[in-house]
Amino acid sequence: MKRLAILAVVLVVMAATNPPRSDYVLWAKDKVMERSTSGLESSLVSLFGNPLISSTTTSKDLYFGTIFTTYYGDREITTLGVMNIFIPLK
């Protein structure tokens, strides 16, 4: 019974901290800016990153986490959002 109560608490915390799409977009933009190689690229990402990432991202809500898939050219970037953190999957 104690294990069931602990599991219930963990699931409630996970559901309450399921990150929204807007948090993912900000996180993804920061990651792109970290990897940018020039000032111009950083400036463009800073200006257009949010709407571009948002428009090329789909999400699947799993109640206790969300899978975000961003299409970047011919690449597909899949990220798990859980407990207000993002874990790149591929």
Image: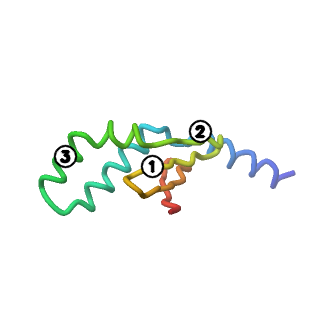
**How much space separates mark 3 and mark 1, taking CA atoms?**
18 Å
Task: Please provide percent x and percent y for residue 77.
Answer: 46, 56
The colour scheme applied to this rendered structure is: rainbow
Most distant residue in the right direction: 1
Most distant residue in the left direction: 39
Earlier along the polypeptide chain: callout 3 or callout 1?
3
Label 2: which secondary element = helix
Task: Please provide percent x and percent y for residue 73.
Answer: 37, 53
Is mark 3 in CB contact (under 8 Å) with mark 1?
no
Q: Mark 3 points at which residue?
A: 44
Label 3: which secondary element = helix
Number of the label disc, if any, that sits on residue 42: none
Eye-nearest disc, 3 or 2: 3
Q: Which amino acid does label 2 sit on?
A: Ala
Task: Please provide percent x and percent y for residue 44.
Answer: 19, 46
Earlier along the polypeptide chain: callout 1 or callout 2?
2
Quadrant location of residue 75? bottom left
Q: Which amino acid does label 1 sit on?
A: Thr
Q: Name the residue under label 1.
A: 70
